[in-house]
Image: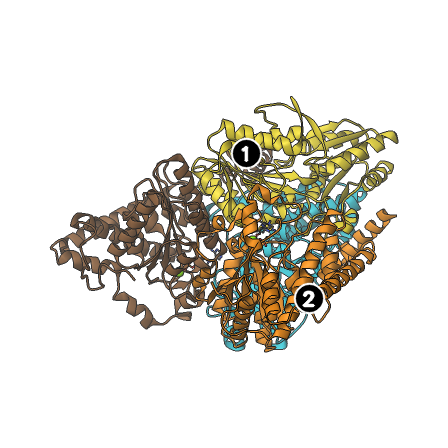
Chain colours: A cyan, B yellow, C orange, D brown
Amino acid sequence: MTVLTMAKALNDALDVALAKEADVILLGEDIGRTGGVFRITDGLRESHGAERVVDTPVAESAIVGVALGMAVAGMRPVAELQFMGFSYPAFDQVISHVGRIRNRSQHRFSAPMVIRMPYGGGIGAAEHHSESAEAIYAHTPGVKVVIPSTPYDAKGLLLAAIADPDPVIFCEPIRLYRSVKEEVPEGWYEVPIGEARTERHGTDITLVAWGAMMTETRAAASQLEEEGASVEVIDLRSLVPFDADTVVASVEKTGRLVVVHEAPRTAGFGAEVAATVAERCLYSLVAPVRRVTGWDSVFPLKRSEAQYLPGVERIVAAARQTLES
Amino acid sequence: MTVLTMAKALNDALDVALAKEADVILLGEDIGRTGGVFRITDGLRESHGAERVVDTPVAESAIVGVALGMAVAGMRPVAELQFMGFSYPAFDQVISHVGRIRNRSQHRFSAPMVIRMPYGGGIGAAEHHSESAEAIYAHTPGVKVVIPSTPYDAKGLLLAAIADPDPVIFCEPIRLYRSVKEEVPEGWYEVPIGEARTERHGTDITLVAWGAMMTETRAAASQLEEEGASVEVIDLRSLVPFDADTVVASVEKTGRLVVVHEAPRTAGFGAEVAATVAERCLYSLVAPVRRVTGWDSVFPLKRSEAQYLPGVERIVAAARQTLES
Amino acid sequence: MRQRLTPSGGLEGAAPLDLELTRRLYRAMVVARTYDRKSTALQKQGRLATYAPFEGQEAAQIGAVAGLEPQDWVVGTYRDAALMWAQGYPWELLFAGRTGDERGGSPPDHINVMPPSITVGGHMVHAVGLAWAEKLHGSGRIALTSFGDGATSEGDFHEAANFASVFDIGCIFLCQNNGYAISLAREFQTRSETIAQKAIAYGMPGIQVDGNDLFAVYEAVKEAADRARAGDGPTLIEAVTYRRGPHTTADDPTRYRSENEDAGWADRDPLERVRIYLSERDAWTEEWQETIEAEAATEIDRAIDLAETMPPLAPGKILDAMFESPPAHLKAQRAELLEQQR
Amino acid sequence: MRQRLTPSGGLEGAAPLDLELTRRLYRAMVVARTYDRKSTALQKQGRLATYAPFEGQEAAQIGAVAGLEPQDWVVGTYRDAALMWAQGYPWELLFAGRTGDERGGSPPDHINVMPPSITVGGHMVHAVGLAWAEKLHGSGRIALTSFGDGATSEGDFHEAANFASVFDIGCIFLCQNNGYAISLAREFQTRSETIAQKAIAYGMPGIQVDGNDLFAVYEAVKEAADRARAGDGPTLIEAVTYRRGPHTTADDPTRYRSENEDAGWADRDPLERVRIYLSERDAWTEEWQETIEAEAATEIDRAIDLAETMPPLAPGKILDAMFESPPAHLKAQRAELLEQQR
Ligand SMILES: Cc1ncc(C[n+]2csc(CCOP(=O)(O)OP(=O)(O)O)c2C)c(N)n1
Ligand SMILES: Cc1ncc(C[n+]2csc(CCOP(=O)(O)OP(=O)(O)O)c2C)c(N)n1
Ligand SMILES: [Mg+2]
Ligand SMILES: [Mg+2]
């Protein structure tokens, strides 16, 4: 056990995977010589060689499409896209090929590959550097979508993603890269993809979130507990497969649901969570479902960032309203 | 008034727009010499010239990005992407630029443009020719998303889209191009974007759908009425802006909601409709919301198509269950 | 433009292939043409979905594979049935795909041919990845990706070619320039005089060959394959040919090209010049022609039969190949689907 | 590689610009460098967000605009502040953008300069569309799009160049090859010996010039602009220069390049050679240098002041420019936002 940031935990996961599995190969822009803009691949080129930690030209569609070809030929590519905002040029490859090759070939060919992308705002970055488009990937058939919120989960989920026989979109919350540290086991361990984690148990209300918004959600839960509410907090961790059972069981118990995400509201993944509850445990609901989300707008620049990001107050306020009804 | 198919109504709309507005220009693959693979632009090159009905090279990202540049410089481009399945190479242009240029420049530049794309399955086409990715565009800030289900709406909405000061993703249900005819006024008229149309009024249950699924939804409604239920049918017509008020008012009256769409279920737009109801009129709901949708899979090939497409039976069955609870 | 076999069957230089192999390849072109014409006929009868004929491009496809090793990867398009078959993809699966059966995309285990690419451009990067993996595995295998003149306008062509050259990947880029992208003539697709010269943008060798010349195509691909296998990287080959038929059975070429243009190409038929070449060397006879045509008909009919007698995919199967094993939500949807089927 | 002004200030051929204009452009380069260095300083003080310095590329940017007309479109990148300013984009807005204020993307009405492109590659197609519209409007305006060596690997570069050439669009493609894409050296970005030769893929003229040579850049752009305005289509210009600083203030170049490499380029400074050229013609003096540096400092300080004293965007404003007028759901979200602000 060592105490690591999420950034280091991810670096450790990649290091462990490269050491264990000869077919693991890393592809991305600036991941080698500089170790990536967020230094997630720091030192890996030195320790595993330039052939396995490959600095590519600036071409996202090729990075993903080439990784797909490698995966079909038996390798385990892990592609890094520098920011989720730069994953869109590769979107055609993801939705048209990565998520389909297994079905297209009826299992003859498959794409055991991971596409890593830093995502989310809160660091005052330039336009395109604060995207939260996870719902778009969640609506893409044939890919799994994973989003860790702790160093432990980050390493375990990334190793699970690398071991997964199918493609995984691995979203890394930029804001959490270095903001928290925790004990992380050495070596290989996996956190199962598709299982939400109930972080805090309670009986009055269920808060569901994922990724960076877990920070605000946790803080909101603590504040609500101080106000006397018994709050259940669920970290979804995987959007696909979506662990609906855990959410439904929780809402059947609490009767109240607030979903929190940073992405724009309309057709965001919060809608899927709310819809599932409206389908599967409507009669348990004692209050309207509420979504605390980003606005249906572009993620703003530094000076206005705070107006966009759902803060603790907004979550608490929504939860209070929910508790009152 | 003349009786037209949707295909002809769309052709008429483009003809009227080209005649009225010198800055309207059509761009796309094979739209000129052949009049498009669905013949929607048939005859327009002959009547308006090759400079205004432009056959482009095979490059979707350029078609959309070039149209954006034209729009910024004061033109009114209408781009055709041959199928929605081929819109993905242009997705980066749509989400990174088309939907953002107005905000990026704080109104200094804008993109009054339309991106037309045939979408949906049911014609036994090859892979990629049956996509329903409307939710992905609906989750893209800064673009409107419109989907007609009748010839009258098709022409009126397309003209409204061309007149709109902002970019519109215009999804054309392939299955409806020639399956229905109705009276369509000559000349210019607009159907307002953002207004759902309540096609049939009823008090027991609300069916919400759009695009090609309106056919099955209408049939299901008739069947349910024969069984004695009073059914309200809403054609959303626009997903963005989403006319939530019409849906909410309807569910407040009926207490029951079934949403129908062809797209995969997870994070589809049906989730947004269900979530909105769970937020805004939970207490009116007397039965769980139900979604009748495509599966979370690739749209299958011809021989298995029927297994994927939500049919009248599935809609009726879901409505019955909803009415019984 | 490289040519070894003139339209009239004349040979330039020494024959790159012996007579026996030339006969085998000629026969293969006859079988391919039989498949192609049969497919169009079946489509008209409603027994196949829309079909994209390759008549006129047989030499480009059969000649190319002749330059490869059996285990090399082939990544082609909806118009490359002959190319895929030559590398081992069974006719019945190619038919099955056109009947609208997912199993058509699933070649036998030892066949390194990807299912036909329906999207234009996106498949070339896959070939680069395949060849890259083989290079790292030291298997000695390379990849050939085939695409059309129109596909060269897609960004993915550019990204694939650049990656292949930057990393010395053993990938052959075979452009079958058949003069059209649906209705758009080659001259309106790009202003570069040749497609081959686009290789200069990647510091990659680019070769333009007569795509209706079996020998020239074979030679160019063999040369590129040797280079690729030696670790010297990719090659772009432009095979100049002609799409004799419509873009697909749904297309009406009279809207964008003239009869006489087509006629001009009839004289440049890829089969005819090999036939003359063989007959001048007493390696072709009327009888043999009849024999191989009969054999071809039997082979193709058998394949159709296999495809059409395939029982339909069992209900629910369409959800079973989204992942190696269906997650809970797909299991639930599968149950819903079966429920509805009853 | 075309050169008109050697690093030591020697002139090849006749001077393409008169002394007065050369002095103006030299002064502009001094102002630009002042802005650039000041920005890095301010970023270190936390007064600006991450900044991408262009030191070393002043001639490429200032020289390019000298070859344009005032109403021509300029579509550049995050590293093109000098280019944009030269075409009329106010310094204070460039600063404002870097402070994280959306209004930085909104140039005055008569300025035909797009906000800097943050994504690599995607903006070139916009320039093609702008020039195309101007062509149809018969305005006589053209467009220049600027991008880096790394951007040439993106599919959008390829698609933009192909469209421009196929439709004879008056768009100039100016590649500032500054040797690096973040950490990736030019040699690993693509195998083509020059970026200029990529033009051959589009049947387009391609010119490689010394990007640190004000005269050579001006001349190449002027030549391309004349061709574009005459309706003869696009040109690709590769301006070979060097990124003297880090990729951005967040980057550490020592991880991927050596000190001596940088040193080599110091001798090729784009300002110094013009200074020598002018002084040898008695058109430069110490005093004048001090004057223009002082004026530059004042101009830049004034701009910073304007940017920093801008009142923040009013709450809710971030939702007001998604559409011309906010639809109901954005009005509702705006109300929610204001609610929360209290
Ligand atoms: C990304 C994408 N865009 C558009 C299409 C529609 N389409 C199918 S074939 C074709 C023309 C391709 O022409 P070419 O590359 O020359 O190949 P050919 O059909 O001539 O063999 C087009 C535009 C597609 N399948 N995929
Ligand atoms: C589509 C996209 N991919 C990746 C990035 C991240 N990125 C920003 S600048 C850059 C390098 C660009 O290099 P070059 O084109 O040479 O321009 P330079 O920075 O040298 O001026 C990269 C990869 C981006 N902004 N956009
Ligand atoms: Mg072609
Ligand atoms: Mg550079």
Mark identifier at residue B44? 1
Q: Where B323 falls versus A228 (above or below)?
A: above
**Percent x, y for residue D180?**
40, 64
> Which residue is the extreme one toward the left?
D282
SS at mark 1 in the image: helix
**Percent x, y for residue C326?**
76, 59
Q: Where A119 falls versus D319 (above or below)?
A: below
State which quarter of the image contains the C terminus of chain A: top right
State which quarter of the image contains the N terminus of chain A: bottom right
Q: Is residue D123 visible?
A: no
Image side of residue A203 versus residue A266, left or right: right
Q: Where B37 falls versus C123 (above or below)?
A: above
- Marked residue chain, label 1: B
Label 2 or label 1, whichever lies nearer to me, is 1
Q: Tell me the quarter of the picture where residue A175 sits.
A: bottom right
**Percent x, y for residue C251?**
63, 45
Name the residue tied to disc 2. A164
**Front-lying residue, A297 or D337:** A297
**Percent x, y for residue A84?**
55, 55
Answer few, some or many: residues within 10 Å of disc 2's Cα (few below 14, many 20 plus, some between 14 and 19): many
Residue type highlighted by circle 2 = Asp
- Residue visible at 69% across and 49% down? C50
- Marked residue chain, label 2: A
**Front-lying residue, A144 or D162:** D162
Image side of residue A83 versus residue A189, left or right: left
Q: CA distance from mark 2 to mark 1?
A: 51 Å
Mark 2 beta carbon near ligand 2 (under 8 Å)? no
